[in-house]
Image (spheres, rainbow, N blue to C red):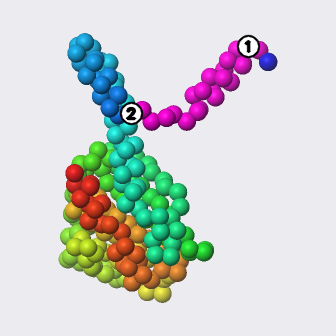
Amino acid sequence: MTRYALNAILLLLVCSAPVLAEDINEIFTKVNEQVTKKNYAKALEELGWARKELEKLHRERVQSFFPNQLGDFTGGKFEANSALGFTNIERTYSKGENTLRLSLSGESGGGQGLGGLAALGKMAAMFGQQSGQESLRIAGRTATLSQQEGSDSAELMIFLESGSMLKLEQSSGAQGSALKALAEKIDLAGLDGYLKG
């Protein structure tokens, strides 16, 4: 093996190793040091790293509202993705062969980017119902429960005051009343309060 090939492999191993979280306070200390030196370009670069760490901490905080056990269902791994300033955090729960998915959609910056969309969802729930859809309130928040007659799948959408939307869905063996009972086990007030800031 040539020396260059060995160096390339070592570089790949180092780059693919898990990156440890950097202490947020150390990052802000670096920002302040660069501002004192009037090196604003470097300060902005450090702020970029601070944002990445804050987003990681925010995601972990939101995930803490997804219980490990939801009724008889056991929580699995989290999936999170972001696009165009919006984030979706999802966790799949299982009980035997039955699965349940809990997801939260909202603006990744902590603002109320989906506020308009959540508000439209609330209005739709209050004024017009489609066949197989029921409007209800869970922990003081407007929600819609969708289940077509004869179907064993159901979806419960809860519109949070923060502008985010929490969705609970089950693709088989679902009963609307059971989904509602499971949603009532989630700390919606705590989650909504945290997201409001």
Residue 166 location in percent, x, y? 34, 64
Is residue 51 visible in the rendered image? The answer is yes
Q: Is residue 120 left or right of residue 48?
A: left
Give the structural element (helix, strand or loop) at label 1. Answer: helix
**Circle 2 sits on which residue?**
23
Is residue 118 visible in the rendered image? The answer is no
Which mark is on residue 3?
Answer: 1
Along the line of sight, the residue nearer the viewer: 115 or 63? 63
Q: Earlier in the sequence, mark 2 or mark 1?
A: 1
Give the residue displayed 56% in from the left and 74% down from the top.
Answer: 95
Residue 41 location in percent, x, y? 29, 18
Give the residue displayed 45% in from the left and 71% down from the top.
Answer: 70
Give the residue displayed 24% in from the left and 71% down from the top.
Answer: 141
Where the N terminus falls, by quadrant? top right
| Three-letter amino acid code at the position of disc 2 | Asp
Res 98 quadrant in image: bottom right
| Three-letter amino acid code at the position of disc 1 | Arg
Q: Is residue 135 left or right of residue 175?
A: left
Q: Main secondary structure of the magenta part?
A: helix
Give the structural element (helix, strand or loop) at label 2. Answer: loop
Residue 52 location in percent, x, y? 38, 36
Residue segment shown in magenta = 2-23
